[in-house]
Every structure is written in C-alpha cells, then in structure tokens.
Amino acid sequence: MERKIPIHDHDGYIVPLLWTFAFSHNEYWCPCCGENYPMFHDEEEIEETPILKERREQYRKQTKNYLAAVGMIKGKARKKWGGQMKSFAEYSKSTQRKWKRWIKEWQPGVTL
Ligand SMILES: [Zn+2]
C-alpha cells in the first residue's frame, strides 16, 4: 500500500515535513524553510518514494540537535539526565549555551 506523506514544495524541490513535538500545536515542520504546520493541515500530501524517504532521514539527522534544542528552550520540554527529568534552566550553563548555539546554527533554505 502506498504511503502518503505531507510535503512542502519549494519550486519543485520537494521537502518531506518532519514530525516533531518541538513546536507546540505544530507537529509538522519543514526542515528546509522552517514553516510549522498543525497535525491537521491543508498541505499537499504525496506518495512516499525511496528518494523522499531518504531525504526525510537526512533532514532528520541534520536537524536533530536543532529540534531538541528548540523543544527544550521554546517548547519547555524536559529531558532526562542522570535519572532526573530536568528543564532547560536546571541544566549547566555550558549545556544551555550548546543548545542556544544549535538553534543559532540552523539556517533555513538548506537543500540536500
Ligand atoms: Zn518549506
């Protein structure tokens, strides 16, 4: 059975949206331009191809740190560390700086 996936079409360059909880109420995110979409959205969905599946995995790897940092800082997520759930403020300054750097380092418009 064919699987339909949500995408963002950038003038013919198709970007599979990533599923993430980093942004509240917007579970889909375009790793190319940074647009957010709610779970129920009107964006186009197309059949998943091996190329799109690979592209999604590449984007997921590339943006993993950024999404984790956004979730911690903006989404007020908590992460387990040393057996305890901690919020952003409870982490060391160096870890906080690392996450802030990951957010700054992300650039929109990346095509793979
Ligand atoms: Zn986009």
Image (cartoon, rainbow, N blue to C red):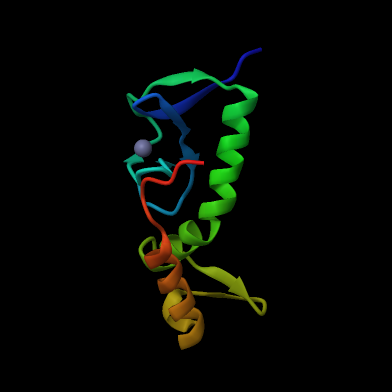
Residue 69 drawn above or below residue 38 = below
Query: In this image, 96 relative to 36: left or right?
Result: right
Quadrant containing the N terminus is top right
Residue 18 drawn above or below residue 73 = above
Q: Tell me residue 35's x, y (percent).
A: 32, 42
Query: In this image, 80 relative to 8: left or right?
Result: right
Q: Residue at position x 37%, y 67% from top?
A: 104
Q: Quadrant of ligand 1?
A: top left
Nearer to me, 81 or 61: 61
Q: In this view of the protein, can residue 46 be seen by the observer? A: yes
Residue 99 drawn above or below residue 91 = above
Nearer to me, 64 or 25: 64
Q: Residue furthest bottom?
A: 93
Q: Tell me residue 15's x, y (percent).
A: 45, 33
Which picture quadrant has residue 31?
top left
Q: Residue at position x 61%, y 31% from top?
A: 53
Q: Residue furthest top?
A: 1
Q: How many marks?
A: 0
Q: Residue at position x 54%, y 56% from top?
A: 64
Q: In this view of the protein, can residue 92 be seen by the observer? A: no
Query: In this image, 50 relative to 22: left or right?
Result: right
Q: Tell me residue 26's x, y (percent).
A: 36, 43
Nearer to me, 29 or 81: 29
Q: Residue at position x 45%, y 87% from top?
A: 93
Q: Tell me residue 76's x, y (percent).
A: 40, 65
